[in-house]
Image (cartoon, helix red, strand yellow):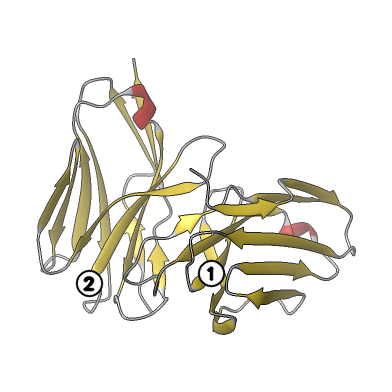
């Protein structure tokens, strides 16, 4: 089955800098790639997603890049703020059913 | 704004007891899920229900059983809890297949088994 790997378990940046979280996947049929954020003591919520028909998607300070050949996708956060500190989960799925596979999460710490 | 409600928030119990967790969503979604998040924050899908029908049943121990009365409710019962069941149980819903649609998560139920 699909395996999603997040390469950074922890990422620390200074406020105002950019942060990049990288994920790889194994199933070439995967076509939907969402990202979820979990702040300390809270549950997960959706932040952004990308589908395989595009290779880039931007929403305010968040950009997702998808490289289908390398089976890699990444979340870029610009002008980081303390409230960006959280665990970020990437995920992948084939898009046709209820099977979605999560990475193990990346703890992003934004230092003032 | 919260639209997936879980009760209780916390539950402490002893090995061998039975526990039940409740989940209700007010989004009108057809599909609901139970996820387990362990102490390392790893997420594992346990069950998925589409309009009261079980459609995904991952290899979880038989002491876990989901129960759904209608598409807005999905409960989880654990018979005879074990120490390894200590975790946060997250309920979620989506308007369609998780493979295409956003998941909306509840706040979670933290279970501690003594």
Q: Secondary structure at mark 1?
A: strand
Q: Are marks 2 and 1 in contact (CB under 8 Å)?
A: no
B56 or B103, nearer to the observer = B103
Of circles 2 and 1, which is in front? 1
Q: Quadrant of residue A98?
A: bottom left
Q: Secondary structure at mark 2?
A: loop
Which of the chains bears the disc numbered 1?
B
Q: Is residue B12 above or below residue A97?
A: above
Residue B32 is tagged as: 1
Q: Position of residue B23 (x, y in %)?
A: 65, 60
Instruction: Name the residue at 86% across, 68% down.
Output: B80
Q: Position of residue B55 (x, y in %)?
A: 52, 84
B28 or B32, nearer to the observer = B28
Instruction: Name the residue at 22% across, 21% down.
Output: A16
Asked whether, in this view, residue A23 is left or right of residue A45, the answer is left
Q: Is residue B103 visible?
A: yes
Asked whether, in this view, residue B9 is left or right of residue A23, the answer is right
Q: Is residue A85 above or below residue A111?
A: below
Residue A10 is tagged as: none
Which of the chains bears the disc numbered 2?
A
Label 1 crowd (10 A; few <14 / some 14-19 / many >=20): many
Instruction: Name the residue at 39% across, 58% down.
Output: A103
Asked whether, in this view, residue B15 is left or right of residue B47, the answer is right
Q: Is residue B114 visible?
A: no
Instruction: Name the residue at 72% across, 54% down.
Output: B86
Q: Quadrant of residue A25?
A: bottom left
Residue A31 is tagged as: 2
Q: Position of residue A93 (x, y in %)?
A: 32, 71
Q: Alpha-carbon distance for marks 2 and 1?
A: 21 Å
Q: Position of residue A63 (x, y in %)?
A: 17, 45
Asked whether, in this view, residue B90 is left or right of residue A62, the answer is right
């Amino acid at each position: 089955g699909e395996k999603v790997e997040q390469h950074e378990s922890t990422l620390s940046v200074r406020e105002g800098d950019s942060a990049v979280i990288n994920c790889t996947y194994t199933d070439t049929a995967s076509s939907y790639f969402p990202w979820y954020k979990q702040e300390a003591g809270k549950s997960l919520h959706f932040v952004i997603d990308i589908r395989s028909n595009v290779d880039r998607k931007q929403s305010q300070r968040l950009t997702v890049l998808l490289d289908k050949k390398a089976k890699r996708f990444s979340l870029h956060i610009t002008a980081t703020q303390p409230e960006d500190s959280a665990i970020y989960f990437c995920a992948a799925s084939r898009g046709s059913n209820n099977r979605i596979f999560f990475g193990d999460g990346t703890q992003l710490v934004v230092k003032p | 704004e919260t639209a997936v409600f879980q009760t209780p928030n916390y539950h402490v119990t002893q090995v061998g007891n039975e526990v039940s967790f409740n989940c209700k969503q007010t989004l009108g979604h057809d599909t609901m899920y139970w996820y387990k998040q362990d102490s390392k924050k790893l997420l594992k899908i346990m069950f998925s229900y589409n309009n009261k029908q079980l459609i995904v049943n991952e290899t979880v121990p038989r002491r876990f059983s989901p129960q759904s009365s209608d598409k807005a409710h999905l409960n989880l019962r654990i018979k005879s809890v074990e120490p390894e069941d200590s975790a946060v149980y997250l309920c979620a819903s989506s308007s369609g297949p998780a493979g295409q649609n956003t998941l909306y998560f509840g706040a979670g139920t933290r279970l501690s088994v003594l």
